Image: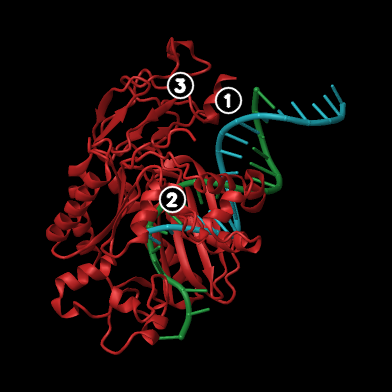
Chain colours: A red, B green, C cyan
DNA sequence: TCTGGGGTCCTAGGACCC
DNA sequence: TCTGGGGTCCTAGGACCC
């Protein structure tokens, strides 16, 4: 084992029945009563059930219809107020950031904290005091929400720790005792082992982590594949050295909708795609990113689901492009029987924008900017601002790339090959005047082509 | 009234390149 | 000319998580 911490310094916090808890906080008449938050329509599912509702068998991901059948009259079924959850979540995350600069938020109600980076003592008494204090402050600051805390030597163990003692839990797993905690547990309690993997493992007699520990690496890889198999092999040995990573960049953005009744009319489907594309694009633009791949998700009346995708040569962040591509993808799908769900996604999110190296006509490009952008040049970071309407046609213009920071909107309409002015390096295979002495670290196949 | 919505990661095959 | 290995990109589907 390499890199695994020798101290219990990873904290995992999981807020208890978070959405329902916020509802009970804001509406005292709901306190002590079963509350179910989620889709309330015919095709809704449960997002969160309060512990009172769980006592009747309501569970996350259960259909709302099933939850209604199980819960007594007087149970509150609520649609969800995501703005309120988000504000409350921020209060909690701010508290965590007081503990350490390294906080990785996993979702609205879950986060990891690197206590070592916060300089905290890691003996069990100190950790228990720290967690007790955190839980109390969290409860006060949120006005009533509670959370469960696990502290251990790795993310996996910390998460398992918070899971084992909820709700309102606190479990410290001291370094050295990981396997004692892990081995009696059912494999299904390991993060990453869901119904399919659980069934596979159980079909060969692996039910507990101890069973898992007895199997060879090649057995497990043969059973569930390379990545998952070696992951389980390491997990059974408490071998998990994944770092806490704050501010992960999003890799895709999508929007989807399940319709109350199945759609059949092509015009209606195309209209829906337009509005999904618009939702996706507003988020892309808000984040200042652009993507190269459009994916259409399509769920039939019988729940069979398929996806179709297409990758364009240029990054885009406009609703017209996303909608047009998605509608083209729709045209290739058999819609017989009706459509239950449509989704539109954009991936291949650009950290850079690439000009067209292979345009037939190497005319200088004109970029039409729709708002101010900062362009960050690499490998030597430097910025230059472009303004709306500013003519960036330039003597240096030829062929090349523009790298942009993720925070700034750098998607502009390229009317042909482009090299921006300023500190961005340029390179063109057929024009030595445009080649810098030390070409930047080219990425992507287009760059390789141009060099070979 | 069966089965939401937003994500991540992995696999596998084919194309294409070196 | 034949064989082939390694690597990346693209597409489709699936498992899993909250």
Would residue A303 be found to the left or right of residue A345 on screen? right
In the rendered image, is residue A250 in sight? yes
Numbered tag placed on residue A346 in the rendering: 2
Give me the chain letter of mark 3.
Answer: A
In the image, B4 versus A188, the foreground residue is A188
Q: Secondary structure at mark 1?
A: helix
Q: Residue at x 39, y 87 (%)?
A: A69
Indicate which disc, 1 or 3, sits on the residue closer to the N terminus: 3
Position in image of residue A213 (x %, y %)? 57, 49
Position in image of residue A328 (x %, y %)? 53, 57
Give me the chain letter of mark 2.
Answer: A
Determine whether label 2 and label 1 are within 8 Å by CB. Answer: no
Mark 2 to mark 1 CA distance (whole Å): 26 Å
Position in image of residue A364 (x %, y %)? 41, 25
Q: Which of label 1 and label 3 is nearer to you?
A: 3
Give me the chain letter of mark 1.
Answer: A
Q: Do the residues indicated by labels 1 and 3 lie within the same chain of the protein?
A: yes
**Pointer 1 local density, CA inside 10 Å: few below 14, some 14–19, many at least 20:** few
Determine whether label 2 and label 3 are within 8 Å by CB. Answer: no
Q: Which residue is mark 1?
A: A449
Q: Secondary structure at mark 2?
A: strand
Numbered tag placed on residue A441 in the rendering: 3
Q: Residue at x 23, y 37 (%)?
A: A118
Indicate which disc, 2 or 1, sits on the residue closer to the N terminus: 2
Would residue A219 be found to the left or right of residue A270 on screen? right
Q: Residue at x 49, y 28 (%)?
A: A443
Would residue A281 be found to the left or right of residue A438 on screen? left
Q: Which of label 2 and label 1 is nearer to you?
A: 2
Q: Secondary structure at mark 3?
A: loop
Numbered tag placed on residue A215 in the rendering: none
In the image, A197 versus A178, the foreground residue is A178
């Amino acid at each position: 084992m390499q890199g695994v911490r020798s101290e219990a310094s990873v904290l995992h916090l999981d807020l208890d029945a978070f959405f329902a808890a916020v509802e009970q906080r804001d509406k005292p008449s709901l306190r002590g009563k079963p509350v179910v938050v989620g889709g309330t329509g015919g095709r809704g599912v449960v997002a969160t059930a309060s512990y009172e509702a769980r006592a009747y068998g309501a569970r996350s991901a259960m259909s709302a219809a099933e939850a209604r059948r199980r819960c007594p009259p007087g149970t509150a079924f609520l649609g969800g107020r995501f703005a309120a959850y988000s504000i409350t979540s921020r209060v909690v995350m701010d508290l965590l950031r007081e503990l350490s600069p390294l906080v990785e938020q996993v979702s609205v109600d879950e986060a990891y904290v690197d206590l070592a980076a916060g300089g905290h003592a890691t003996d069990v008494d100190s950790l228990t005091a720290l967690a007790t204090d955190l839980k109390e402050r969290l409860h006060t600051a949120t006005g009533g929400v509670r959370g469960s805390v696990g502290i251990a030597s790795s993310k996996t163990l910390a998460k398992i720790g918070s899971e084992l003692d909820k709700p309102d839990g606190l479990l410290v797993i001291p370094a050295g005792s990981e396997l004692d905690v892990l081995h009696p547990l059912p494999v299904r309690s390991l993060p990453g082992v869901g119904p399919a993997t659980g069934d596979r493992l159980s079909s060969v007699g692996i039910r507990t982590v101890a069973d898992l520990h007895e199997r060879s690496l090649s057995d497990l890889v043969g059973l569930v594949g390379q990545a998952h198999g070696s992951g389980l092999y390491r997990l059974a040995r408490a071998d998990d050295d994944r770092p806490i990573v704050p501010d992960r960049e999003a890799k895709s953005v999508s929007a989807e909708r399940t319709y109350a009744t199945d759609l059949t009319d092509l015009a209606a489907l195309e209209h829906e795609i337009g509005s999904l594309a618009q939702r996706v694009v507003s988020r892309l633009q808000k984040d200042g990113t652009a993507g190269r791949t459009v994916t259409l998700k399509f769920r039939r009346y019988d729940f069979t689901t398929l996806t179709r995708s297409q990758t364009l040569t240029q990054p885009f962040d406009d609703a017209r492009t996303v909608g047009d591509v998605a509608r083209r993808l729709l045209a290739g799908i058999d819609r017989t029987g009706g459509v239950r769900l449509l989704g539109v996604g954009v991936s291949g999110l650009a950290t850079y924008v690439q000009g067209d190296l292979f345009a037939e006509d190497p005319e200088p490009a004109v970029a039409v900017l729709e708002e101010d952008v900062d362009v960050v040049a690499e490998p030597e970071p430097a910025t230059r601002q472009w303004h709306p309407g500013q003519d960036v046609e330039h003597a240096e213009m030829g062929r090349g790339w523009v790298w942009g920071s993720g925070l700034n909107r750098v998607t502009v309409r390229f009317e042909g090959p482009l090299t921006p002015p300023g500190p961005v390096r340029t390179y063109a295979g057929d024009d030595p005047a445009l080649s810098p002495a030390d070409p930047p670290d080219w990425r992507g196949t287009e760059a390789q082509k141009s060099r070979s």
